Amino acid sequence: MKTNPLTRRHFLRAAGTVIALPALESIGFRRFASAAPTVARPKRMVFLGFGWGVTEESWYPDAKVTGADYKLPPGLAPLARHQKDFTLVQGLTNKFANEAHWGSTFWLTGANRFAQPGQSFHNTISADQVAAEVLGKDTRFTSIQLGSPNAIENGHGPGLSLAWDRRGKPMAGLDNPLLAYHRLFSDETMPLAQRQAMLSQKRSVLDAVLTDARRVQRGLNKTDTDKLDEYFQGVRDIETRLSKDEQWLDVPKPKVPLAEPKPGLAGRDEIALMYDLIVAALQTDATRVITYRQPVGSLLSSLDLKIAAHDMSHYTTGDRLEASQKRDVTQSTLLAGLLDKLKAVEEPDGSSLFDHTALAYGSNIRTSHYLDNCPTILAGGGASLKLGQHVVLPPNTPLCNAWLTMLHGLGIQAERHGDSSGVVKELLA
């Protein structure tokens, strides 16, 4: 019996190569009607989270003016050219949030930190990882977590990134552009045979560990049994990652027109370069799910502001207020640049990368120590949301309702997420 030569591995290699290239007419990409049909473009999801909130008086639009005719406040003025392509939502809150300095720990999970009796900290899966389980099956990286060092200084609280796995465990992030660049785009220098041997060795170690763990499984009390079950789940997660590594072992990483980042970038330049890496990762289909836990302290320093981020968040007047407002404008300027680049990347079917990306931008902190009315901007055509709007929801509407709505828009029919009570009908296109 003759086998099909188009194996899954061949398809993935071909897909990775084609997506990494621009839409070249010489190899079949045409804009006129007689062109060969192209496959549906993949959906992508991006979450951009920052700590310490915003300047309430100059970031939020007038709550009395909703719909498409609202006026952008000064803190969002740099986004004016994209106003028709994002929706700003007020009224969203994580009802269990109770830590004023934790701008991202529960931002994407909506979890109750005291949900487990006898424990002082508990978390659940983040919205990006719900998406990654579906969108990340056919990419080299199921998801990518970007971050920055000094989480406390940046107002983020516990966690290694914005992402938390299905067990509610923190997922590690790449804390500078240089690390992210090499992880995404640098080919391995180690010979293939040696990498294969290392993966085989890791599997052997896992097998030995599982054998030892199962020997002590009998006769345990419930508490120890639960701990061991969690341990086994962790091992299964490692096995999944090893399987993914094996799948892509001999597939070269895509080439991108980005030079290797200089070490030591911080603040504004760091965020701008991370945004470039996000666009490149999505464009080359290296991953379809990305989170970025952004810096604030180093951003202030890069703007020659001599005020600590925490002190700035307690603005009233004077230098603190000025620093807070300058922070808002700079963040909005950077976000506008990212949207420009997503729109500029042309897909093989003539659409843009922006058209197939669902992007959320915000924080779990409104301002100072206030945790209600979380600043929230939703952009991109990937989740089929109603864009160009100012939506004011009833106070304390679950923030997870917005994440659930985005997930549904991406075709991920989760029944609920975190403390969600349903989708946000006002966001449905």
Image (cartoon, helix red, strand yellow):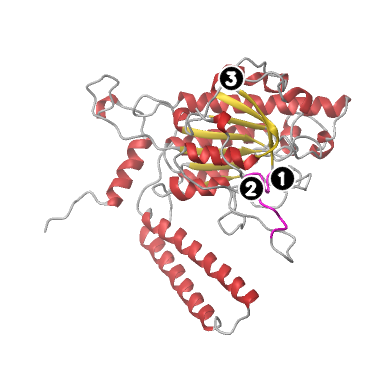
Mark seen at residue 185: none
Q: Quadrant of the N terminus?
A: bottom left
Question: Is 314 placed above or below 208 here?
Answer: above
Magenta run includes residue 110: yes
From the viewer's perspective, is the residue at label 1 or at label 3 nearer? 1
Amino acid found under the numbered disc labelled 2: Asp
Q: Of residues 284 and 119, which is closer to you in this image? A: 119
Q: In the rendered image, which residue does mark 2 sit on?
A: 419
Labelled pair 2, 1 in contact (Cβ < 8 Å): yes
- Kindly report which numbered mark, 2 or 3, lies closer to the viewer in this rendering: 2
Name the disc covering residue 95, or none: 1
Left or right of 192, for residue 109: right
Q: Is residue 87 magenta?
A: no
Between 242 and 88, which is closer to the camera in this rendering? 88
Kind of residue indicated by mark 3:
Gln
The local crowd at label 2, few if under 14, some if 14 to 19, many if 20 or more residues have their Cα within 10 Å, is some
Residue 175, position in %: x, y?
62, 46
Q: Is residue 251 left or right of residue 281?
A: left
> Gap between marks 1 and 3, in whole Å?
29 Å
Q: Please, is residue 45 above or below residue 37 in the view?
A: below
Residue holding disc 3: 83
Residue 6 against residue 273 in the figure, above or below = below
Q: Amino acid at mark 1?
A: Lys
Answer above or below: position of 306 versus 14: above
Q: Point out the tag, 1 or 3, that comes first from the N-terminus.
A: 3
Mark 1 falls on what kind of element?
loop
Q: Mark 3 Cα within 10 Å, few/some/many (few <14, many 20+)?
A: many
